[in-house]
Image (spheres, rainbow, N blue to C red):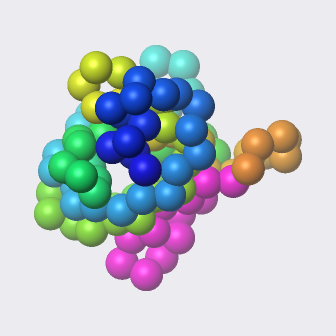
């Protein structure tokens, strides 16, 4: 589904996908802190995952790790980003998550 959304240039798409971590990046510290990493998903698309560390625990990742992700996909020309990988503290948005080594982080 991520690859189809990327090819179609679609954003604000609820997705559930999985893949391999290709790179763990520095945290984004501008505004809310986010853990960031790249995942190669089905179809070969590489996507950035931005996981809010103020609303969910850090996922202990390394390149090569397998993950499953539920969140919202936003298009960009580099593959896009998946965010909302956590619960919404105000209950206005469907909860996302990241599953890694049998544990769910949200």
Q: Is residue 61 magenta?
A: no
Residue found 46% across the figure and 18% down from its top: 30
Q: Identify which residue, 87 or 2, lies in the foreground.
A: 2
Would you say residue 65 is visible in this rendering? yes
The x and y percentages for residue 59 are 40, 59
Residue 8 quadrant: top left
Q: 100 or 2, which lies in front?
A: 2
Asked if 28 appears above or below 62 in the picture, the reply is above
* In the foreground, 52 or 10: 10
73 with respect to 93 (left or right): left
Given residues 41 and 10, the one toward you in this image is 10
Toward which corner of the image does residue 14 lie, by quadrant?
top right
Whether 62 is drawn above or below 1: the answer is below
Residue 52, horizontal then vertical, whole percent? 53, 40
Residue shown at the point (42%, 37%) measured from the top left: 5
Rendered-image quadrant of the C terminus? bottom right
Is residue 101 part of the magenta span, yes or no? yes
Q: How many marks?
A: 0
Q: Kindly identify the residue that appears in the image at 45 percent across and 68 percent down.
A: 99
The boundaries of the magenta stretch are: 95-106
**Can you give x and y, in whole percent of width and height, for residue 31 in the image?**
54, 19
């Amino acid at each position: 589904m991520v690859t189809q959304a990327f090819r179609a240039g679609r954003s604000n798409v609820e997705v559930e996908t999985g893949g391999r971590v290709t790179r763990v990046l520095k945290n984004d510290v501008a505004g809310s802190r986010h853990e960031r990493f790249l995942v190669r998903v089905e179809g070969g698309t590489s996507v950035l995952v931005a996981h809010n560390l103020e609303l969910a625990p850090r996922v202990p990742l390394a390149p090569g790790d397998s993950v499953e992700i539920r969140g919202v996909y936003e298009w960009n020309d580099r593959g896009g980003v998946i965010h909302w990988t956590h619960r919404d503290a105000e209950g206005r948005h469907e909860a996302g998550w990241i599953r890694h080594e049998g544990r769910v982080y949200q």
